[in-house]
Amino acid sequence: MPSPSELLQRYFGYSSFRGPQEQIIEHVLEGNHALVIMPTGMGKSLCFQIPALQLDESAVADGEKPPITLVLSPLIALMKDQVDALQNRGIRATFINSSLRRQERETRYKAVAEGKYAMLYVTPERFRKPEFLEVIARRNVRLLAVDEAHCISEWGHDFRPDYTRLAELREILGNPTTIALTATATPDVQQDIIRQLGLTADEIRLYHEGIDRPNLELKVVDVWDTDEKLQSIHEVITKWQSASTGSGIAYFTLIRTLEEFSDRLRREGVDHVCYHGDLDRRARRAIQEDFMEGRSPVVLATNAFGMGVDKEDIRFVIHADVPGSMESYYQEIGRAGRDGEPSECVLLYDQRDLNTQMEFLRWSNPDADFYQQVYHHLTDNNEQVRAFGIDWLRERLCHRQKHDRRVETALAMLQRHGVIENEIDLRNVTVSCELPATLADEQRLTEKLLRDQKKLYALVQYVQHEGDRKDFIHEYFGCARPEL
């Protein structure tokens, strides 16, 4: 039977593991649970992909029906890319999610049931489907990998309600060996992840790689108006363009601000591309591919850009606006300097940007009455909702404030809780259950808003920190900084 090192070389072309990867892999292969906190781009996925391959090849060598490794991920948009990359390496992996047509889903269900795949990527919401439960019951799930594990926790920055069912889902699967992985988790989130998995602290080993990136230079620059902000962005881009062949990202909060700065930078001769959520999917994919291949080395983007961007030579990350939380900030700067070479992370701090983030917090935290009103319109005025869509809802609930995004938040949360299906334009929307108690609990919703506000305040404290900002980050995430 090949060793993990041999599998690493054969399938991924690496001669050795990085950091604690091999230790984690051996721990998991011995049937032990693990919580892995590792910086973005440091190879978390290998910590479950290599065990999946070894379990598969071991069964084949013994003439047994191979087990399957189930990978839970909330990121439908990335599953295809992740699976394509594995298949290109000769690994028997697939995904099943709502992006597939019914016939294709049924074909994959049949192949999974027949044992044709060693790895299956799904969202936790897939467990709502009886046909999936029937198929997965026919396979021996030896390993469960929970990617983006911070989504388990209500204290995390991207809570997914179905992740709170993980203890139940593990029981359905026969309580397989479980590895949970994330790039960012505060001590509170770490404890919540373990609890939601149905485990205790002594049943799971924590591998915390810290967040030290010695090659990253962290800077905060105070700016007082748009002109100063533009000048700072121009200086960073031209500095790195003249010094290297690497690439860079400048993050903006609002699309209209991004486009304004794009126009001004083009007038000053700064070549770049723009990426944001209002572009169609084909255009976004083309821009990302051009960036990844080095044809467009500088991109101005909203935070819609980044998931799936694993590029080694990103020399700078600029935050043109204040991010919404320390977690978001750290994930985004983590895309710089993955090759270990010097890279620069510049946060441009204009106090006025906090007003925008506070408005975002209001939009992303509707109160219980607002959720009740949305639910009422979906049930009692379903014909009008189907006919006139989200604009009709916004006119009635947000007093025609076109930038108010509370309706989008409410619909997204109703979808995550399984109240409605994923309907982009609401033409066929149906309500399948009652309003969840968590969305009707005003105290709970108020506490969540307060937590989100504290995360934004932590970023302000980071900006105002007079010492080493990396020390501040380590303290925030509850990990010791490595000794130099």
Image (tube, helix red, strand yellow):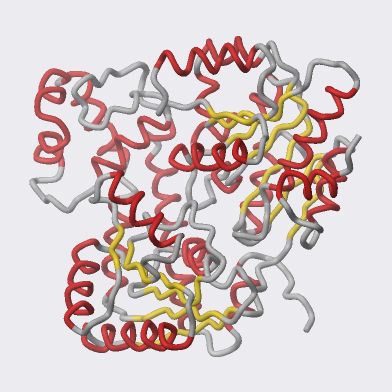
**Is residue 115 found left or right of 225 in the rendered image?**
right
Give the residue drawn at x 60%, y 36%.
87
Q: Quadrant of the C terminus?
A: bottom right
**Is residue 93 found left or right of 424 in the rendered image?**
right
**Residue 320 vertical placement versus 324 (above, below):** below
Q: Quadrant of the N terminus?
A: top right
**Is residue 302 found left or right of 341 in the rendered image?**
left
Give the residue drawn at x 18%, y 23%.
427
Image location (x, y in percent) of residue 17? 79, 57
Image location (x, y in percent) of residue 64? 85, 16
Give the residue drawn at x 66%, y 24%.
117
Give the residue drawn at x 26%, y 32%.
424
- Residue situated in front as seen by the camera: 12 or 432: 12
- Quarter occupied by residue 16: bottom right
- Quarter occupied by residue 325: bottom left
**Is residue 114 found left or right of 442 in the rendered image?**
right
Image location (x, y in percent) of residue 29? 85, 38
**Residue 449 vertical placement versus 256 (above, below):** above
